[in-house]
């Protein structure tokens, strides 16, 4: 028989949890690889509209393009801006992109293999590739890697007009990147889940 009189088995479970908000504990904390490299911290505002990302209950998307382990371009888009960008695509491009996704999008998550083909990260890490995260608050709910071949394939199905409007997004938001800088034909093209 135990003489232990402790009657609070759960102890002080909230003791070290100073978060005032009631965060759903879905997903995981956004990994450092999806932090803003240029700001050296998690993304705080939408690259397109500048609004605070934490204010969007429906979440936001982070995209980062890499060449080997160097981040070439990165952005975070709130869902209204992501929708607006997709809306700027021509009808033809929208249909083509939706078809491409429905035909190729795989039931995988994470950065270990391409979301659109079966290439493993190990086989693309010495070239160009892209990481994306579906985030909400400080959590990442889903993530994906897209290999260069698939980025190129997506770019190739986009109409001239659509590519121009996404190039414009890139030029307006990343003035440091020359407009003819093209290791990524689909730079600025948001990855849709
Ligand atoms: Zn926005
Ligand atoms: Zn791929």
Image (cartoon, rainbow, N blue to C red):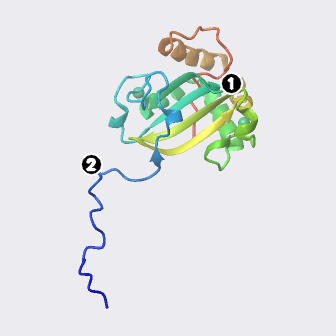
The quarter holding residue 158 reads: top right
In which quadrant is the N terminus drawn? bottom left
Q: Residues within 10 Å of mark 1 (few under 14, many from 20)?
A: many
Q: Quadrant of ligand 2?
A: top right
59 relative position to 107: left or right:
left
Instruction: Identify which residue is drawn at 52% across, 9% down.
Output: 176
Residue 176 against residue 71 in the figure, above or below: above
Q: Along the line of sight, which residue is nearer the eye, 166 or 159?
A: 166
In this figure, which residue is indicated by the disc labeled 2?
18
The quarter holding residue 155 reads: top right
Q: Secondary structure at mark 2?
A: loop
- Cα–Cα span, label 1 and label 2: 45 Å
Q: Along the line of sight, which residue is nearer the eye, 109 or 49?
A: 109
Contact (Cβ within 8 Å) of mark 1 with mark 2: no
Location of residue 118 in the rendering, given as x and y in whole percent from the top left corner: 75, 43
Q: How many marks?
A: 2
The quarter holding residue 72 reads: top right
Location of residue 37 in the rendering, given as x and y in whole percent from the top left corner: 49, 25
In this figure, which residue is indicated by the disc labeled 1?
155
81 relative position to 9: left or right:
right
Q: Along the line of sight, which residue is nearer the eye, 164 or 16?
A: 16
> Is the distance from the Cβ of mark 2 to the nearest ligand 1 atom less than 8 Å?
no
First along the sequence among labels 1 and 2: 2
Instruction: Identify which residue is drawn at 59% across, 8% down.
Output: 178
């Amino acid at each position: 028989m135990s003489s232990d009189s402790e009657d609070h088995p759960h102890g002080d479970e909230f003791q070290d949890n100073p978060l005032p908000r009631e965060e759903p504990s879905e997903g995981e904390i956004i990994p450092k690889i999806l932090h803003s490299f240029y700001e050296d911290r998690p993304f705080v505002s939408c690259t397109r509209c500048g609004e605070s990302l934490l204010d969007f209950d429906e979440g936001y998307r982070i995209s980062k393009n890499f060449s080997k382990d160097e981040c070439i371009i990165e952005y975070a888009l709130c869902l209204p801006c992501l929708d607006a960008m997709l809306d700027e695509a021509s009808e033809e491009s929208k249909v083509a992109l939706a078809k491409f996704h429905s035909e190729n999008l795989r039931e995988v998550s994470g950065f270990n293999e391409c979301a659109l083909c079966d290439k493993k990260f190990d086989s693309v890490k010495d070239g160009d590739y892209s990481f994306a995260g579906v985030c909400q608050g400080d959590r990442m709910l889903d993530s994906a890697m897209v290999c260069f071949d698939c980025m190129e394939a997506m770019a190739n199905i986009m109409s001239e007009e659509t590519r121009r409007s996404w190039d414009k997004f890139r030029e307006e938001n990343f003035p440091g990147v020359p407009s003819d800088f093209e290791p990524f034909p689909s730079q600025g093209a948001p990855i849709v889940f």
